[in-house]
Image (spheres, rainbow, N blue to C red):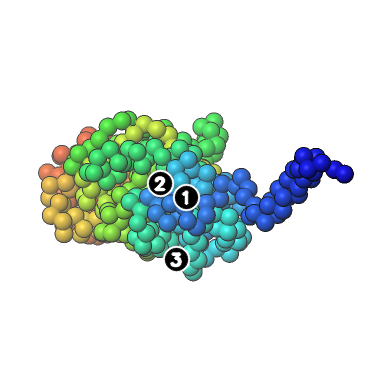
């Protein structure tokens, strides 16, 4: 006869492994996948809305962009991808990534241009509880720590409405010559804060040549008042900045490089937009900005800074065989384009304007 002690030992040896196997079978499997579940804070309560307009992006460009955004070390984000009527496989890629990461929201609309796509993204962001908005182009790459650094900088003071940061072009500078990108004109931001200083903010466009949308984190409240003009496809970034700057309190600049801007993309808007279309858009932008600043009561005080910001852009797209005088004067307005205003501008800007006047047969101010 087997002793009770021996039976007890055998029961432990034989039954425990079997019990463990049964428990493992009945218990749900949890992998090491980092995909957030529907109950995690980063889905239900995002702090940053990232807006990505998408139109016919090369698959490996789009995948690298989405990977850089979903792999952010700061997890409380929502990723709003607006497919603007793509005719390639871009929408399919977006939906595939959205299945893996519930923070991705995919919106499909008929082709209306980048401004309309960004407006759709803003409308979606306004529905959430996020505090900030970050624009990312679908062929670019966001540094892994970007959202973490930007959120921390923005939260340093409640008056900060914009956090501007640095970017790096790629491929490297050695490969940029054929693209004709004047990277040497774009100056880096230093660690500084502009407090209620509209002219200093405008100088980031005139001096630093920093007019993109994607090198700034925006407090979302600003976007309740400022939208993109759907019909403008070139220079929409300049227009948006010049409409937003009068409505901000503080603009904080940091020296961190957090964004990688792809150059040499043959499908980029800047490369496919016709010269005449660019010129007409810039003229229309002048009209919108002058009207907006007049409504805000800012035009008289800041018109020299405004003229300096726009003069260089206008001068790029003139045609010597066409008389632009009526368009130019009508766009700026006679109250902006006057002698006293011109004299307040930096000498290099005055030189640009004198050249522009000569080219367009405008009486030299």
Q: Element type at marker 1?
A: loop
Residue 41 in picture, x, y percent from top left? 43, 51
Tag 2–tag 1 contact (CB < 8 Å): yes
**Disc 1 packing (10 Å; few <14; some 14–19; many ≥20):** many
- Disc with the residue nearer the chain's start (2 vs 1): 1
Q: Residue furthest right?
A: 1
| Disc 2 to disc 1, C-alpha distance | 7 Å
- Disc with the residue nearer the chain's start (3 vs 2): 3
Residue of label 1 = 137
Answer yes or no: is residue 59 visible. yes
Disc sitting over residue 112 in the figure: 3
Residue 100 in picture, x, y percent from top left? 58, 55
**Disc 3 packing (10 Å; few <14; some 14–19; many ≥20):** few
Measured along the vertical axis of the image, is residue 177 above or below residue 53? above
Q: Image quadrant for the C terminus?
A: top left
Q: Residue furthest bottom?
A: 110
Determine whether, in the image, residue 110 is placed left or right of residue 335: right
Q: Residue at x 50, y 57 (%)?
A: 38
Q: Element type at marker 3?
A: loop
Determine whether, in the image, residue 21 is placed left or right of residue 179: right
Determine whether, in the image, residue 180 is placed left or right of residue 347: right
Q: Residue at x 47, y 52 (%)?
A: 40
Q: Quadrant of residue 295?
A: bottom left
Question: Looking at this view, is 281 or 157 the one in front?
Answer: 157
Q: Element type at marker 2?
A: loop
Disc sitting over residue 214 in the figure: 2
Closer to us: mark 3 or mark 2? Answer: 2
Answer yes or no: is residue 306 visible. no
């Amino acid at each position: 006869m087997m002793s009770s002690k021996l039976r007890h030992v055998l029961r432990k040896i034989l039954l425990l492994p079997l019990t463990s196997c049964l428990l493992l079978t009945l218990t749900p499997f949890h992998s090491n996948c980092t995909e957030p579940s529907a109950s995690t804070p980063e889905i239900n309560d995002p702090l940053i809305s990232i807006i990505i307009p998408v139109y016919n992006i090369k698959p490996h460009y789009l995948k690298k962009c989405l990977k850089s955004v979903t792999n952010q070390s700061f997890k409380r984000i929502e990723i709003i991808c607006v497919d603007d009527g793509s005719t390639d496989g871009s929408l399919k890629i977006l939906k595939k990534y959205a299945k893996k990461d519930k923070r991705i929201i995919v919106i499909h609309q008929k082709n209306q241009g980048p401004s309309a796509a960004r407006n759709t993204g803003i409308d979606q962001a306004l529905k959430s509880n996020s505090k900030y908005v970050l624009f990312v182009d679908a062929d670019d790459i966001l540094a892994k720590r970007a959202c973490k650094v930007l959120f921390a900088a923005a939260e340093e003071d409640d008056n900060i409405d914009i956090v501007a940061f640095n970017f790096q072009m790629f491929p490297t500078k050695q490969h940029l010559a054929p693209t004709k990108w004047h990277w040497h004109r774009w100056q880096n931001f230093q660690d500084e804060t502009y407090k209620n200083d509209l002219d200093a903010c405008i100088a980031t466009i005139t001096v630093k040549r920093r007019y993109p949308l994607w090198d700034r984190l925006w407090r979302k409240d600003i976007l309740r008042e400022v939208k993109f003009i759907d019909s403008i496809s070139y220079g929409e970034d300049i227009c948006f900045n010049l409409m937003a700057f009068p409505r901000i309190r503080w603009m904080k600049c940091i020296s961190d490089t957090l964004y990688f801007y792809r150059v040499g993309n043959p499908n980029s808007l800047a490369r496919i937009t016709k010269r005449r279309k660019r010129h007409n858009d810039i003229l229309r932008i002048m009209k919108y900005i002058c009207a907006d600043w007049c409504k805000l009561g800012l035009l008289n005080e800041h018109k020299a800074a405004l003229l300096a910001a726009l003069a260089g852009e206008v001068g790029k797209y003139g045609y010597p065989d066409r008389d632009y005088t009526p368009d130019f004067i009508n766009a700026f307005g006679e109250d902006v384009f006057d002698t006293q205003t011109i004299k307040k501008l930096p000498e290099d800007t005055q030189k640009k304007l004198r050249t522009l006047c000569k080219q367009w047969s405008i009486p030299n101010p």
